[in-house]
Amino acid sequence: MRQKSALIFGYNDYTFEIEKNISAYYKNIYIFRLGEYSELKEQNNYKIHSFDLSDNWDDLSTIVDIDDCVAFCVLEDMAENIFLTISLRDSFKDLTIVALAEDKESTDKLTLAGATRVIPTTQTTANIIVEMLEKPIVTEVLHNILYEKSDLKIAQIVVDNNNFFDGKYPADIDWSREHGIIVISIVHDDMSSEFIYASKEKHHIIKSGDIFVVVGYEQDIKDFEKLIGSRL
């Protein structure tokens, strides 16, 4: 059963992309900005609350039913994001916490801090997620990956062995049948990205250094990684 309320801690581009794309799933959405602000305006019809990392969260318990919430920790400073996760977990043992991480190190730390789900968000992945969320059917899939107890994972795999593809184009490969995964996008060495279904990408020969953004089950992703390269 989905929670009725969502708490988003952070005030940045991630905040409002998340808010925009979970509004259909949660009855109440609360956005919290770190620090004290004399003028907190409403954006997208949501009041922006302030909070402090030293908060003991007593006030939060009076606003929402914690047992019926999911919290998103999206502070851009990873040390603060980790501290926030620790604080929320210490106060609310059963709270569902989704935290954004910038690399494997912060992913590990956020997991240890008590996050229920940790999502790596390098800038390229962030851009891809934003674009994906514009497609309704993918939004539903992504929601299940990010916010529910799904076994599906999102990963970035670097192509080290382009000989494996033997000069093929992405459109030439049945990714699901041959490898048990879905390739969403390809990130090039200049860090530009294209959806796998884009006309430009259909005519791009796969080469070493390309990064595949894939969705699949963990074992299938590991098997694919062994064939072509390494995971970011």
Image (cartoon, rainbow, N blue to C red):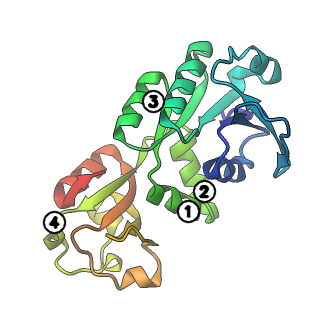
For marks 2 and 3, the one nearer the N-term is 3
- Which residue in the structure is indicated by mark 4? 161
Residue in front for this viewpoint, 58 or 55: 55
* Foreground tag (1 vs 3): 3
Q: Which mark is residue 24?
A: none
- Which residue in the structure is indicated by mark 1? 132
Say what amino acid the circle numbered 1 marks.
Answer: Met
For marks 1 and 3, the one nearer the N-term is 3
Q: Disc 1 versus disc 2: distance between alpha carbons? A: 7 Å
- Which residue in the structure is indicated by mark 2? 139
Q: Disc 2 versus disc 3: distance between alpha carbons? A: 25 Å
Q: Disc 1 versus disc 3: distance between alpha carbons? A: 25 Å
* Foreground tag (4 vs 3): 3
Question: Which SS class for mark 1?
Answer: helix
Does the residue at mark 1 contact the one at mark 2 (Cβ under 8 Å)?
yes
Say what amino acid the circle numbered 2 marks.
Answer: Thr
66 displayed left or right of 124: right
Q: State the image coordinates of residue 91 (x, y, percent, origin top left).
A: 62, 14
Q: Which residue corresponds to the image point at 47% horizontal and 49% vertical from the top-left?
A: 121
